[in-house]
Image: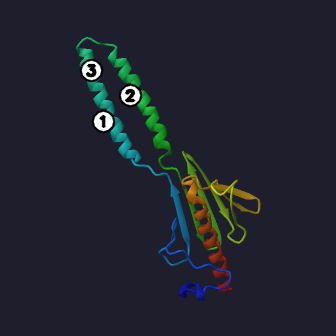
Amino acid sequence: MSALSSHAPRGFAPAPAPLRFGRESASGDGSVEWLLKRNCSIAPRQLLMFYLSLSALSLAIATFFWVRGAPLVMPFAGIEILSVGAALLVYARHATDRERVRLATDVLTVECTIGLHTVAVELSPNWVRVEPEHGDRSWIELSDRGRRITIGRFIRPEHRRAFASELRWALRRWQYESRAAC
């Protein structure tokens, strides 16, 4: 038996060292936060600069051909710029999608931001159930006395079970610490 597990209370697993998906607060208040977000390789501001430079290049080429006597190149360049702009706008709109789960004193706060829509739910850590929605690789459902929210969109399916286990562990630790403080 290891030194860590010999000091853990019965039925209480020692902490994963360190937390794989979340991080504990540096303030020492015992809160834990998980920030799950898309793996985007380019920030929206960088994307805008790329789009502007691509548009300028396309317009420069279209202007060159227009001056040389090919006027139909300009409308097609305009259609191209608008099409690429629409596609990049859809990408940029979802580049900041995220799920934030925070376990703090007496509350588990879950915020899901998808596009321009944000849903925030506060759950009681004493009543939260963490379950896969359908199977081991499906999204994770958090429920508390009739309230439900689904998370795990931004975690690879093979890592969702480990994330759910880490979240369950943090909830058990919180329950143990809250009982010990009484």
At 54% across and 77% down in the image, what residue appears?
Answer: 29
Location of mark 2 (residue): 81
Measured in 3D between alpha carbons, the distance from the residue under mark 3 to the one under mark 1, in whole angstroms, is 15 Å
Find the distance from the CA under tag 1 to the CA under tag 2. 11 Å
Which residue is tagged 3? 63
Q: Residues within 10 Å of mark 1 (few under 14, many from 20)?
A: few
Secondary element type, mark 2: helix
Between 124 and 35, the one nearer to me in the picture: 35
User: Is 169 on the left or on the right of 46, as rendered?
Assistant: right
Residue under the image location 57 percent in, 57 percent down: 158
Badge 1 element: helix
Label located before the other in sequence (1 or 2): 1
Q: Residue at x 33, y 31 (%)?
A: 55
- Looking at the picture, how far across and down is residue 66, in whole percent? 27, 16
Could you say which is closer to the camera, residue 89 or residue 18? Answer: 18
- Give the quarter of the image for residue 74: top left
Residue toward you, 153 or 105: 153
Could you tell whether 128 is left or right of 54 in the image?
right
Mark closer to the chain start, 3 or 1: 1
Marks 2 and 3: in contact by CB < 8 Å?
no
Q: Amino acid at mark 3?
A: Thr
Q: Is residue 95 above or below residue 71?
A: below
Residue on which disc 1 sits: 53
Q: Which tag, 3 or 2, sits closer to the chain's start?
A: 3
Mark carried by residue 4: none
- Colouring chosen for the image of the structure: rainbow
Say what amino acid the circle numbered 1 marks: Ser
- Where is residue 132 shown, x and y percent of the image? 67, 58
Query: CA separation, marks 3 and 2?
Result: 14 Å
